[in-house]
Image (cartoon, rainbow, N blue to C red):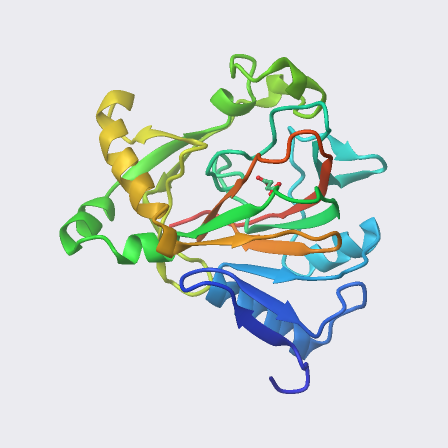
Amino acid sequence: MRNSRIEVQPIAGAVGAEISGVDLSQPLSGDQLADIRRAFGDHGVIFFRDQALSPAQHVAFAENFGPIAINRFFRAVEGWPMIAEVRKEPEQKANIGGGWHTDHSYDAEPALGSVLYAREVPDHGGDTVFASMYAAYDALSDGLKSRLGEMRAVHSSRHVFGQKSGRPAEMKTRILNPELATQDAMHPVVIRHPHNGRPALYVNPGFTLRFEGWTDEESRPLLQYLYAQATKPEFTCRFRWREGSIAFWDNRSTWHLAVNDYHGQRRLMHRITVGGVPLH
Ligand code: SIN
């Protein structure tokens, strides 16, 4: 690819590509950045291997794509309020992000994406699975697409991060500030991606409560249908982490889920979330 020598290798049919030939600890050239942006747009989530980044270099890489959105609920890395810690200790059972979701959909301006950097990984397990909301949308019937295109949905942080969320007690040291979980936001059920205009399904099991003007009970069957559609294996990819791996995902066109299958081992990731724009 031009002078950047970046190589982009898709890892599944609908979503995900591994990028090689770039050292993210160094400032990126215009060509490198253009190629990374293109791969991000085309594949929804991009992966890098064997990167050695300081917190400052991690922040600098993320800032190439927009301002940092500080997560209000995750414990931050000491001295780095912009970097959220995604940690599970050997004696802990619950993990962070263990259900399908897309980050910050409860915000009025949902995050553009997240840059997750693996600091310490288990010997085996602890993969992350991603799903393409472009593919999920494309596979719907024209009739359902047209109906969904007129609908909006309510998203919330309250039931996940709030006082009444029912989180296990062991999460109290990792998920903070329940009193700040006051965000509800309304977004179209089908968004046009802000950069390429492509339609994507924009509801998710983590944060979507209901369709606008519908009750929770009325919304549930259709949401469940869409969730089953979105997680068909052919719309997903699965990433096996190594120390120094990075995943950079698009929160508008993908969902993700952290597989919780490594009890007894530590997994420590650093996450930076890049701010986004209102969705239409
Ligand atoms: C997250 O949901 O942001 C964390 C994903 C992971 O730890 O793999």
**228, 82: nearer the viewer:** 228
Q: Residue at x 51, y 24 (%)?
A: 160
Q: Is 93 on the left or on the right of 166, as rendered?
A: right
Q: Which residue is outermost to the bottom?
A: 2
**229, 240: nearer the viewer:** 240
Point out the quarter of the image occupied by ligand 1: top right
Q: Residue at x 72, y 21 (%)?
A: 173
**136, 242: nearer the viewer:** 242
Which x, y percent locates residue 273? 63, 46
Q: Is residue 104 visible?
A: yes
Q: Which residue is outermost to the left?
A: 143
Q: Is residue 213 visible?
A: no
Q: Is residue 66 above or below residue 225?
A: below
Q: Is residue 267 above or below residue 53?
A: above
Q: Residue at x 75, y 34 (%)?
A: 76
Q: Residue at x 52, y 17 (%)?
A: 165
Q: Is 124 on the left or on the right of 53, as rendered?
A: left
Which x, y percent locates residue 245? 70, 56
Which x, y percent locates residue 147? 18, 45
